[in-house]
Structure formats: C-alpha cells, structure tokens
Amino acid sequence: MSKFTAAVRRLLVREEGATMVEYGLMVALIAVVAVAAVGTLGGRVSTTFSGLTF
C-alpha cells in the first residue's frame, strides 16, 4: 500500500501536468478570443469589400 501512496504523491507533486493544463487553457482562451473577433468583425469586413468595384 505504501508504494501506491508514494506513486500517487509523485503524480500530485509533478508540475509538468500542471504546466500542460495551463498551456491548454491559454490556447483555449486565445481560440475563444479569435472566434469572437472574427464573428464581430467578419460582417463588417464583408460589407466593406462588397461595396468595392474594380
């Protein structure tokens, strides 16, 4: 049983997993901001370019 508890403690103390989670959260936040920006500005840009004639 002590080997099991030692293994669990090692998993909880390791910081590599926490770092991966933090990077995952940052990527998710960047993706949400990018989608919101495209959704907000997409219609305006489309309207602007549809009025152009060459």
Image: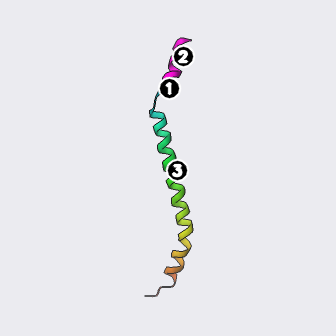
In depth, the one of 48 and 12 nearer the eye is: 12
Write the residue at 54% across / 56% down: 32
The crowd level at tag 2 (other Cα within 10 Å; few <14, some 14-19, many 20+) is few
45 over 1 or under it: above or below: below
The label shown at residue 11 is 1
Magenta region, residue range: 1-11
How many other residues sit within 10 Å of disc 3, few (<14), some (14-19) or many (≥20)?
few
Helix, strand or loop at mark 2 = helix
The quadrant of the picture occupied by the N terminus is top right
Indicate the amino acid at tag 1.
Answer: Leu
> Which one is earlier in the sequence, the residue at label 3 or at label 1?
1
Secondary structure under tag 1 reads helix
Query: Which of the two labelled residues, at mark 2 and mark 3, occupies the earlier sequence position?
Result: 2
- Percent x, y for residue 8? 53, 22
Residue 41: image location, x then y, percent: 53, 70
The reply to whether the magenta stretch includes residue 45 is no
Label drawn at residue 4:
2
Three-letter code for the amino acid on which mark 2 is drawn: Phe
Question: Is residue 8 within the magenta segment?
Answer: yes
Q: Quadrant of the C terminus?
A: bottom left
Q: Residue at x 56, y 62 (%)?
A: 36
Check disc 3 and report the residue beneath it: 28
**Proximity of marks 3 and 1: CB atoms separated by less than 8 Å:** no
Residue 32 in the image: above or below residue 53: above
Q: Quick check: marks 2 and 3 in contact, CB under 8 Å? A: no
At 51% from the left and 27% from the top, the residue drawn is 12
Q: Which circle's residue, 2 or 1, is located before the other in the chain? A: 2
